[in-house]
Amino acid sequence: MYDKVVIKQPAGLGDIFFCLKIAYTFHKGFNCDVIWPVIPQYEWIKDYINYPFIHFINQEEDYPLKNKINQTLFPQTSLLPDIRVLELEENDKQYILVPLQHADWVSPGISVMDAKYKFVNLDLDDWQEFFEFERNIEKENKLYYEVLGLTDESEYVFVNKQFGSPPDTQTCSYIDVSKFSNYVEMSYLEDYSLFDWCKVIENAKEIHTVETSLNFIIDKINPKGKLEMYSKHNPPSYNHVQHLFKANWNYNGQ
């Protein structure tokens, strides 16, 4: 009956990882592929998340419903209590539009992450089972051994202070690297994605990171080091995410 499902959630990375179960459910329920436009900075995601029925595309390129997913349909200044999954027609084809990016407009007062699942009436408890990605071991090793100069015997603390989707990336002020004698700090490196840091993360004796998309990856790869999370809010708050993760995090500042 429907030709495609289109998901509106172009960023952040953690939201995309978290909502893969929703994409899978719509694919199975309506027996059609999913088109998922993302910001240009995240186009690389298609090389790591390889569900054959999910098509991650640059939102600046052409795709079905592009002209209808705009400020007129979803004005940012208004609360739309009647917003919903939409059935739309374009060029004689039938589409389902799932505007997950605006789900919290419908359910104010609850976690913005919980709101995405409440919006489509799904249970979020097993989201990790649907977050599957393919690791590029060659790039992981090159980053680890050649770019960062680490060895198999290296002992270090892994630090990430950055959060937010580019170009609006911010820095967490709560993480003090001066207390670490030997640390590796995550940074944006050309030709390396967030997933390519997996080996560095796995082998760290401690992990100190702001609450961000990295937490979703850590929940999947289960690294050996102690896990320390820092809030991106002032004062610190983890109400939106603390219940999502199974890893043994210490939530600083609460």
Image (cartoon, rainbow, N blue to C red):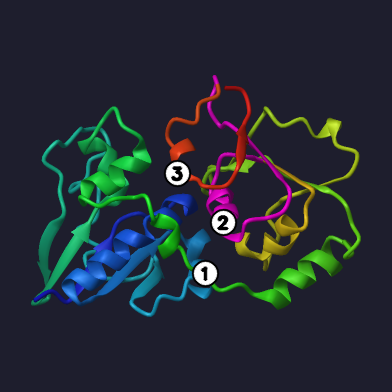
The residue identified by callout 3 is 244
**Which mark is first along the chain, 3 or 1?**
1
**Spatial distance from mark 1 to mark 2, Cα to Cα?**
9 Å
Frontmost residue, 56 versus 159: 159
Q: Please indicate whether residue 131 sits to the left or right of residue 186 in the image.
A: left
**Which mark is first along the chain, 2 or 1?**
1
Q: Position of residue 16 (x, y in %)?
A: 42, 56
Q: Are discs 1 and 2 less than 8 Å apart at CB?
A: yes
> What residue appears at the point 52 percent right and 59 percent down from the top-left corner?
41
**Which mark is first along the chain, 3 or 2?**
2
Q: Amino acid at mark 2?
A: Ile
Residue range (magenta): 209-235
Quadrant position of residue 81: top left
- Is the residue marked by circle 3 packed among few (<14), some (14-19), or many (20+) residues within 10 Å? some
> What residue appears at the point 64 percent right and 33 percent down from the top-left corner?
172
Q: Are discs 1 and 3 less than 8 Å apart at CB?
A: no
Q: Secondary structure at mark 2?
A: helix
Whether residue 3 appears in this view of the structure is yes
Q: Position of residue 170 (x, y in %)?
A: 59, 38
Q: Secondary structure at mark 1?
A: loop
- Is the residue marked by circle 1 packed among few (<14), some (14-19), or many (20+) residues within 10 Å? some
The residue identified by callout 2 is 217
Residue 214 covered by magenta stretch: yes
Q: Amino acid at mark 3?
A: Leu
- Is the residue marked by circle 2 packed among few (<14), some (14-19), or many (20+) residues within 10 Å? many
**Spatial distance from mark 2 to mark 3, Cα to Cα?**
12 Å
The residue identified by callout 1 is 133
Residue 93 covered by magenta stretch: no
Frontmost residue, 94 versus 73: 94
Q: Amino acid at mark 1?
A: Phe
Q: Secondary structure at mark 3?
A: helix
> What residue appears at the point 55 percent right and 74 percent down from the top-left corner?
134
